């Protein structure tokens, strides 16, 4: 299980060097808010660790999503991550297919991460269980769950351990990797180890509980020690 940490600035990225994957996003622009391409490029020069970049919580805009995904890949992201903030399987297939094509046609070794939300009912968006087969069908690499509305409610408030284990096991059958995120706390790590996703994504946990605070290197090391 790998630890993905989401810094929002270059200074925070320097403090995130111990993480397995460094994830570039802009929390002020949403759950999976996109940061600037020049920030992605500069963070890419700081470490040899894999770099992930969120491109946004998207409505049904296949063209906009494809262009944003291509831009993130060109800027240096190894993982390009999009959130599906809308409902409907056919619409989701359109957006996922467009993002996969935009990245894979030129960068076949880069990874496409498709995120749905644990709180999809209040987001009025596609459920993770509907999203995952479409992600596999379209050639994405990782199916992810995160919280869409950041009000400090955890993914566990909306999907219990059994549901998340089922999601993870289904993804294995679909030959997808699984990433889980969403206001996790240190006390959630034991449950996450039982679920055993490929990646867990954190920000608030390593900011002392407030995702709008600053990433702390000591808390990243604590999380890694607990995961290992």
Image: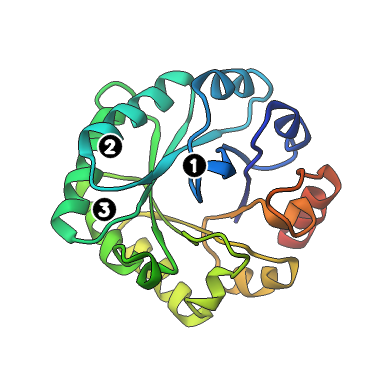
Q: Residue at x 42, y 41 (%)?
A: 56
Whether pointer 1 and pointer 2 mark residues with C-beta atoms closer than 8 Å, the reply is no
| Residue under the point 48% across and 28% down | 77
Q: How many marks?
A: 3
Which residue in the protein does label 2 denote? 99
For residue 51, above or below residue 178: above
Camera-side mark, 1 or 2: 1
Residue at the outermost left position: 90
| Residue on which the image places disc 3 | 136
Q: Is residue 186 visible?
A: yes
Tell me the crowding category of disc 3: few under 14, some 14 to 19, or many 20 or more residues within 10 angstroms, Cα based.
many
Q: Nearer the viewer, residue 13 or 170?
A: 13
Residue 63 placement (x, y as % from top left): 21, 32
Which label sits on residue 33?
1
Residue at (82%, 55%) from the top-left corner?
222
> Looking at the image, is mark 2 or mark 3 nearer the viewer?
2
In the image, what residue occupies the spot 29% across and 27% down? 67
Sequence-first disc among 1 and 3:
1
Which of the image's four quarters has the C terminus? Answer: bottom right
Spatial CA span between label 2 and label 3 = 13 Å
Q: Tell me how far mark 1 sits from mark 3, CA to CA.
A: 24 Å
Q: Residues within 10 Å of mark 2 (few under 14, many from 20)?
A: many
């Amino acid at each position: 299980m790998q630890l993905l940490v989401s810094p929002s600035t270059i200074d925070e990225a320097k403090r995130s060097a111990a993480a397995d994957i460094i994830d570039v996003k802009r929390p002020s622009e949403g759950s999976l808010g996109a940061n600037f391409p020049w920030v992605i490029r500069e963070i890419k020069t700081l470490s040899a660790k894999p770099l992930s970049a969120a491109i946004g919580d998207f409505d049904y805009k296949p063209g906009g999503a494809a262009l944003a995904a291509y831009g993130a890949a060109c800027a240096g992201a190894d993982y390009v991550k999009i959130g599906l903030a809308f409902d409907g399987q056919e619409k989701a297939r359109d957006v996922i297919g467009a993002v996969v094509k935009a990245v894979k046609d030129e960068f076949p070794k880069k990874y496409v991460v498709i995120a749905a939300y644990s709180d999809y009912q209040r987001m009025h968006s596609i459920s993770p269980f509907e999203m995952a087969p479409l992600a596999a069908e379209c050639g994405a690499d990782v199916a992810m769950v995160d919280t869409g509305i950041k009000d400090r409610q955890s993914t566990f408030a909306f999907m219990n351990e059994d549901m998340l284990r089922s999601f993870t096991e289904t993804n294995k059958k679909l030959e997808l990797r699984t990433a889980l995120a969403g206001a996790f706390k240190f006390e959630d790590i034991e449950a996450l180890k039982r679920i055993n996703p490929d990646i867990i994504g954190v920000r608030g946990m390593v900011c002392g509980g407030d995702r709008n605070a600053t990433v702390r290197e000591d808390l990243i090391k604590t999380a890694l020690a607990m995961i290992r």
